[in-house]
Image: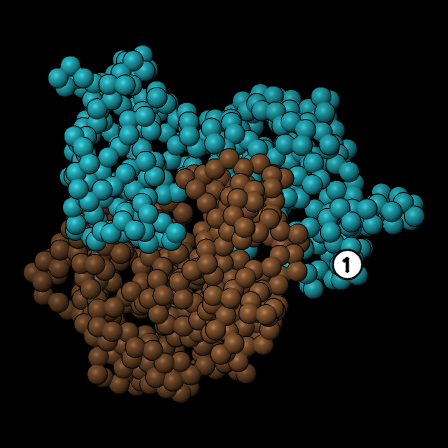
Amino acid sequence: MARVLIEKLTKKFGDVIAVDSISAEVADGEFMCMLGPSGCGKTTTLRMIAGLEQQDEGNIYIGNTLVNDLPPKDRDIAMVFQFYAMYPDKNAFEQIAFPLRMRKFPKDEIKKRVTNVAEMLGIAEILKEPMSRLTVDQRQKIEIGRAIVRQPQVYLFDEPLTNLDAKLRVHMRAELKRLQNELKTTTVYVTHDQLEAMILASRIAVMNKGKIVQYDTPDRLYDRPSDLFVAGFIGTPPMNFVDCTLTRDKDKSVLDAGDFKYDITAIAEPISKSSAGNELILGIRPEDILIRERATETEAIEGEVDIVEPVGNRIIVDLRVGGHYLKANSRPMTLRPGEKVGILLDRNRIHIIDKKTEAVIV
Amino acid sequence: MGTVQVENVSKKFGERLAVDSVSFEVRDRELMCLLGPSGAGKSTILRIIAGLEPPDTGTIRIDGKMVNDLSPKDRDLAMMFQSYALYPNKTVYDNLAYPLKSSKVPEPEIKNTVSDVAKTLGITPLLSRLPAQLSGGERQRVAMGRAIVRKPKAFLLDEPLTNLDAKLRVNMRAELKRLQRELGATTIFATPDQLEALTISDRIVMINQGRILQDGAPNIIYDHPNNIFSATFVGSPAMNILDCSIEEKDGRLVLNSGDFTLHVSELAEFIRKGTSQSEAVLGVRPEHVVLTQERAGPSSIPAEVYVTERTRPEQIVHLRIGKTMMQAITPLTFQCDAGQRVWMTIDPAKIHVFDKHSQNAIV
């Protein structure tokens, strides 16, 4: 196993800069996700690491080896794609064994490795079955088995769960995570699904417009996003954003959103120290909004319940404050559309963003 | 608006029974959701109501009047599909006016109607824009607007949110609900997405293989599914489903999964009445599996943590009990790592029991 290091990678397609001088290190044994909307450059980056695409500038190291000029097969990586490129007439054993046969491994070694991998994936009983008799779930496991049987230095995954239905995706996500716990192989995993990244990754590189915006642990990205893009991209339902103007009255600092005011005196210092002007964005995650019966606490913002969405063990509530809508994610409670409520924002969990630079200040 | 009644409707395509004696009623101003996997028959039912497909048997009534022999355009229904097909070269105003122009409504009346509808939908400032200059939400409003200028009796929506990305979908479904309520629009909404159905419907009709399995309010479907299919289709992560035998232990009724037993004395009467079999299927929602670090009582069951998923704001804990796999939803503050031993407690009052053969709910 080995680390992966990319340095100032750049790739242009015609006039479009797909990947714009990005650098990152994936530590030995780490599960790294590249996360971003389509067109952000994540798949191009993965393909450059694999050697399927040649970078215009920059370096790629696997372990301590500079692999810029190595063809894909000499980079000691295994790549899993969205679609299964299976051989329909071969049985499950042969599907998994294929990469070993290609490399002329001895028969005993092949048998040992395939059996091991199959046991790890819980598919030992189906090794003799032809592919046509297997479920999608089993086929996906075989695809993973074929990637890990070679024991490469690095796994590269390109949205492997995207085409599965919702139930199966949840199941396979857990299987992948458990496998990573056991194998601890360096992994680079591309996805546009923030939940998948949050669950699987030890660190996530959030990408947008060819650049890495933030490279951090899932908890840090969730709790301390560095800018408006990350704050809005991670988490569902997404963080609420309210445009505000900062007003200072005597010794008080207040965010004025037009329809409501919010006192931030206690956290005003970093804002005045920053280069931000008075135009700010207040960010608050839906689960950090508390709904109270009307006017119990003085600092509560008065609002109205607009829509209540039950989602099993939680409810998502659209709250209306004048012309603003805020989404709250709460434990079940009885609320009726039109009902007046008090809205509390968890003071320790609010974010304040500079409207001009979109950087998170607090 | 109006009501829609579907009575004993069946439809075959070749040998395949796509819709099998389906009956339901949509009340005035109600948002009813047809929920089921792809191929369940949802779209066929919508097309039969719209008149795009004739039923083999059965009756469609709109506002009490049978419409089987009416052509689609005479049924006073508005149908919207996955993508909002607005005319890209026409302004919002002209998009809204188009259905009226083509039915030769006089110009001043068109102007009035369009301006009223635009006001209702809050899109008056957008009237001179082209569709390309609108956000997804605005486009949805314009498409709805174009459908309502004709003052239909009901809306038929076939997976209107399916092609949107996940983030946009969360906002659009609330937007759709808001719009439907403002307009008081009787709406039938087909979707394979259980979360969409739970969040926006007044009522859900659960459908599989052309048949209705359950018809009820979202909380009824979630809390009291009447069969295993509904129970596992609705909710994510899905309800834990385990084969069990019904046994007596020390004179008390227990469900034995092979890997653990659950005392269900309180439910004995219902279980005895519900089935004469010795086998049953136990269902437990992940939020009803309560985890503790230490043994919480005599009914606690030891389990091994298989994988944890910090889905924020909670976490999903995958558990292994012998060969049985289960999932629990717990607060993030519950500390646990893969391989660790924890204790789980299941409140018998929260469990579901299904008949193994009929798959129907007993408790």
Protein chain holding label 1: B
Amino acid marked by disc 1: Pro
Specify whether A122 is left or right of B91.
left
Report the coloring of the rendering.
by chain
Please, which residue is most extreme toward the bottom here? A57
Task: Look at 18% across and 66% down and name the residue there.
Answer: A151
Asked if one can make out residue A80 in the rendered structure from this viewpoint, the answer is no
Locate residue A91, reporting x and y percent. 23, 51
B101 or A9, nearer to the observer: A9
- Give the x, y percent position of residue A314: 44, 42
In the rendered image, the vertical position of residue A358 relative to residue A315, given as above or below: below
What residue does disc 1 label?
A: B125
The residue nearer to you, when weighing A272 against B206, is A272
Residue positioned 51% across, 35% down in the render: A334
Query: Residue B311: x percent and y percent?
Result: 36, 53
How packed mark 1 is, by other alpha carbons closer than 10 Å (few <14, some 14-19, many 20 or more), is few
The chain painted cyan is: B
Q: Quadrant of the N terminus of chain A?
A: bottom left
Residue A86 visible in the picture: yes
Where B244 sits versus B121, above or below?
A: above
Q: Is residue B316 left or right of residue B257?
A: right
Task: Tell me the quarter of the picture where residue B355 sits.
Answer: top left
Residue B177 point in image, percent of width and height: 61, 42
> Along the horizontal axis of the image, is A150 left or right of A320?
left
Q: Residue at x 37, y 23 (%)?
A: B360
**Please, what secondary structure does the residue beneath circle 1 have?**
helix
Q: Residue at x 57, y 51 (%)?
A: A301
Which chain appears brown? A
